[in-house]
Image: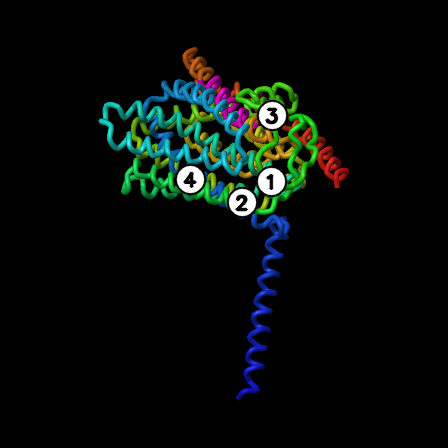
Amino acid sequence: MESQHPRCWQNGAMKTTDDRDRREELSGRLRRLLRIKQAEALPLLWSIGIFFCLMSSYYILRPVRDAMGISGGVRNLQWLFTGTLAAMLLANPLFAALVSKMPRERFIPIVYRVFMLNLLVFFLLLKLLPSQHAVWVARAFYVWVSVFALFAVSILWGLMADIFHSAQAKRIFGLIGIGGTLGAMAGAGITSLLAQSLGVVNLLLLSLVLLEGAVFCTRRLSRCEPLRPAASPKTGAGRSAVPDPPRQTTTAPSPRPLAGVLDGILRVSRSPYLCGICLYMFLYTTTSTFLYFEMATLVEARFGENAAATTALFAKMDFVINSLALVTQALLTSRIVGKLGLGLTLMLLPAITAAGFSILAVAPLLPVIVVFNVLRRATQFAIGKPTREILYTPLDRDAKYKAKSLIDTFVYRSGDALAAWGFKGLRSLSFGLAPIAWIAVPIGLVWAVLGLLLGRHQDHLSQEADAARSRAA
């Protein structure tokens, strides 16, 4: 009997070894399918976790925000967009000052927890204030959610551009987007399932908890070994990055000649490349706002002030959009970028936009605009957003946080506000939805050409950055 023990132990050890080998083989196959390397797996997982929590939090709030905006009347939406722009003007200098004084391990959790505190305040106001004041709280909430969405996601992608270099970004950013897509699906599902039974206001507390989850994942990501050398603080926004020691990526920022609230504006004004990204973002948000207002007009005509039906429609659209985006991000995004190159990939969303507005101009109907909106936003989440963020990977730290934040928030909302007032002006001149759609078509074509030019310039900057790293090595 005793002689069997070593054999049993040996068989168990062999079985354990076989199991481990099978797991490693399966892991290797999965990495090959997703086109990632072993050292990238853990940072990728934490990055996906951050995006999942952020988008779950946002998509719990998004249908609530949109219903509140439409319930106040489509005729008032341009004022909400203008209020959002004003809020961006106040928030950007504060954020730039925070970035100047703190490393990212400190300022990112601080920003997210300020948003958590804001959510708690809105929860108490909506619970305790009398109904006659609810409309003003709803308008403030609309503006706040719009600011929150842009800042939270901009900070995330700035962090991603800080961690992964350009070649990694082209393979990995689409996969990071999976976290956002799954989070959006979860948030939309929670809202559609629980809005009536739990109550709309109580959903704000769930959103708050998910934001704390994003803080946790951010801290875990910061403990991972950096995957890329940091950019030199002396590197200009339009020039190649000169590598510093890798550890500098996660330590306090070095002194910079420009430190203060105007850094983002100065960075953009001194770089034609960043100015091009500004214009690309401006054209994107202009067409987005035209589409949003056309849809809001058709939704209001169909459902009137039925907030429950409007919220349910937006939530269902969000679920379908993110289902399509999920499949594309997992299997196609990195392959599309690899096959077409960055420039042609950046042209896809503008091309779909121009084609969609052309069809909408011929048939300005709710089913048509729903399908157009679903296809456009799915393409934006799966391909447009990840490839646009790749544009920042060759740039320095200030460009990735300060200039990027300015572009993602103030420039974004400037396009929103101008397009909102433009839409309002065209409607006051008796323009129908079809003529306004035709106006958006050439905007989409110009946007497509700009995407091609930016993609080619990013390739050039990335080659210079890679050559600088090779010389330093």
The Cα–Cα distance between marks 2 and 1, rounded to whole angstroms, is 10 Å
Q: Nearer the viewer, residue 78 or 168?
A: 168
User: How many discs mark residues in the rendered view?
Assistant: 4
Q: Nearer the viewer, residue 158 or 23?
A: 158
**Disc number placed over residue 221 in the picture, else none:** 2
The amino acid type, in three-letter code, at marker 4 is: Leu
The Cα–Cα distance between marks 3 and 4, rounded to whole angstroms, is 29 Å
Please tell me whether residue 372 belongs to the stretch shown in magenta.
no
Between marks 4 and 2 in the image, the one whose residue lies nearer the viewer: 2
Tell me which label, 1 or 3, sits earlier in the chain: 1
Where residue 347 appears, as percent x and y from the top left, is 62, 30
The amino acid type, in three-letter code, at marker 1 is: Ile
Per the image, the residue denoted by label 1 is 163
Q: Would you say 314 lies left or right of 40 here?
A: left
Residue drawn at x 60%, y 22% is: 258
Q: Circles 2 and 1: CB distance less than 8 Å?
A: yes
Residue drawn at x 63%, y 28% is: 451
Give the residues drawn in magenta, as a range.
404-420
Q: Nearer the viewer, residue 456 or 254?
A: 254
Residue 336 visible in the snapshot: no
The amino acid type, in three-letter code, at marker 2 is: Leu
Q: Would you say 34 lies left or right of 316 here?
A: right
Tell me which label, 1 or 4, sits earlier in the chain: 1
Q: Secondary structure at mark 2?
A: helix
Where residue 345 appears, as percent x and y from the top left, is 63, 34
Q: Residues within 10 Å of mark 3 (few under 14, many from 20)?
A: many
Q: Secondary structure at mark 1?
A: helix
Residue drawn at x 35%, y 40% is: 191
What predominant SS class does the magenta segment belong to?
helix
